[in-house]
Image (cartoon, grey):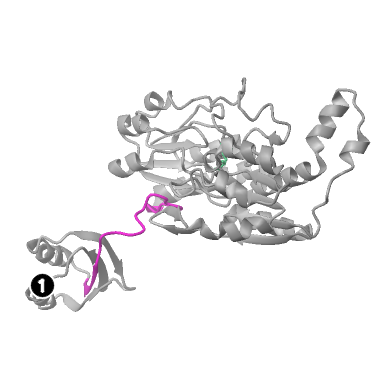
Amino acid sequence: MKVLIADKFPEKYIEQLKELDLEVIYNPKLGENDLPEAAKDVDILVVRSTVVNEKTIYESKNLSLIVRAGAGVNNIAIAAANRKGIYVSNCPGKNAIAVAELTIGLMIALDRWIPDNVIDFRNGIWNKEKYSKAQGLYGRTLGVIGVGNIGKEVAKRALALGMNVYGKDISRIEGVAIKDFSEMDQLLPLCDVVSVHLPLTDQTRNLFDQKMFSYMKDGALFINTSRAEIVDEDALLWAIENKKIRAALDVFKDEPEAKSGTVSSKLQSNPNVYVTHHIGASTEQAQNAVAEETVRIIKDYLTSGVIAHWVNRARITDAKYQLVVKHYDKPGVLASVLNVIREASINIEEIENVIFEGGIVACCTMKLKEPLPQDLLNQIKNNENVLSVSHVAI
Ligand code: 3PG
């Protein structure tokens, strides 16, 4: 089996993949447009932020698993992967501490104007007078928007600084984050600092628009280490101008794809915005933790078929009924049960057959789209190799 690693990945973990008898192709320089060709014949693809677009997925012949060596999966064309039955998994939580550490760093940097201090010093300017006007963070209020793995780590650290921390959680349905963000009009006015830790979904795209910024306190600090598309940058510039908000961002629109080169952004010339180079997850600790998890996911997949952190598994199916059949574990028994269901042209949405110790009896649980008619249920019950049948609406 071939594995392509299309982003930076620690050597030690590449060796571990090789030990699994995999042919490992390591090419961290590949970009979005190189991937369709590079991933054509591979079975497993490992990426960090490199975009896996529809072309890569449709043109792949053997691809069966894509591992996002990180948290956010918005760089992967998941709908296309769904159509080809390609598993997508990620490494949630493994870089949460690194992102939280950067968030706290940005918060202190904003409060103390640290980057401006440094720039002035480098330019031979001494300005103790200007930079002695920080407010301090102790006793001030932080709003954590998105209390997942990263938001929780940020909250813990902010509490240790003596801040009051409010959280705005999101919930997940069908693999996407959904939330009515209406209470933000009550939360944001309380916060001296607002820090965003949301995944990018249809519900969170452009969440921070002018209306949302208008709820924030004048002079508050705004931090985004999650995804650029959650913030409308024009609205942020409006808030900087009209509400004296100051911001620190690890992500911004049109981030360069290459790891080094030039960069251009409308935020560049604004002294009230600090931008870091999308380095939230880029500590050695986090990269090792993510790589270790990636190896674990691939190993589990190869040895047991189980996909850890399988993000494109349907959370909700069309199943409305559950059929549980306990049966003797003999060849053909399950096939005869399935034949009965086929007679009724009912689709089985999900099926799991587990076996009792000793290997005499097994239990098959099926999720069905429609109810099984009574006569067919009786047919299954009357099978001499079936011990019990239960059929319920779910
Ligand atoms: C993530 O979603 O894990 C972060 O955005 C990290 O991105 P990176 O792996 O490209 O640094």
Relative image position of residue 173 (x, y in whole percent): 41, 58
Residue displayed at 88% across by 28% down? 121
Relative image position of residue 46 (x, y in whole percent): 47, 37
Res 204 visible:
yes
Which stretch is magenta?
304-328
Q: Quadrant of residue 348?
A: bottom left
Res 95 visible:
no
Is 49 magenta? The answer is: no
Is 307 magenta? The answer is: yes
Q: Quadrant of residue 113?
A: top right
Indicate whether 370 appears above or below 290: below
| Magenta portion: prevailing SS class | loop
Q: Quadrant of residue 378?
A: bottom left
**Image quadrant containing the C terminus:** bottom left
User: Which quarter is ligand 1 in?
Assistant: top right
Q: Residue pushed farthest front?
A: 242
**Image quadrant containing the N terminus:** top left
In depth, the one of 254 and 18 nearer the eye is: 254
Indicate whether 365 appears above or below 49: below
> Crowding at label 1, few (<14), some or many (≥20) Cα neighbours within 10 Å?
few
Residue displayed at 43% across by 46% down? 202
Indicate whether 204 appears above or below 332: above
Relative image position of residue 390 (x, y in whole percent): 22, 77
Dot 1 corresponds to which residue?
373
Q: What amino acid does circle 1 point to? A: Pro
Residue displayed at 35% across by 28% down? 40
On screen, residue 347 versus residue 350, left or right, reads left
Relative image position of residue 63 (x, y in whole percent): 35, 37
Mark 1 lies on a secondary structure that is: loop
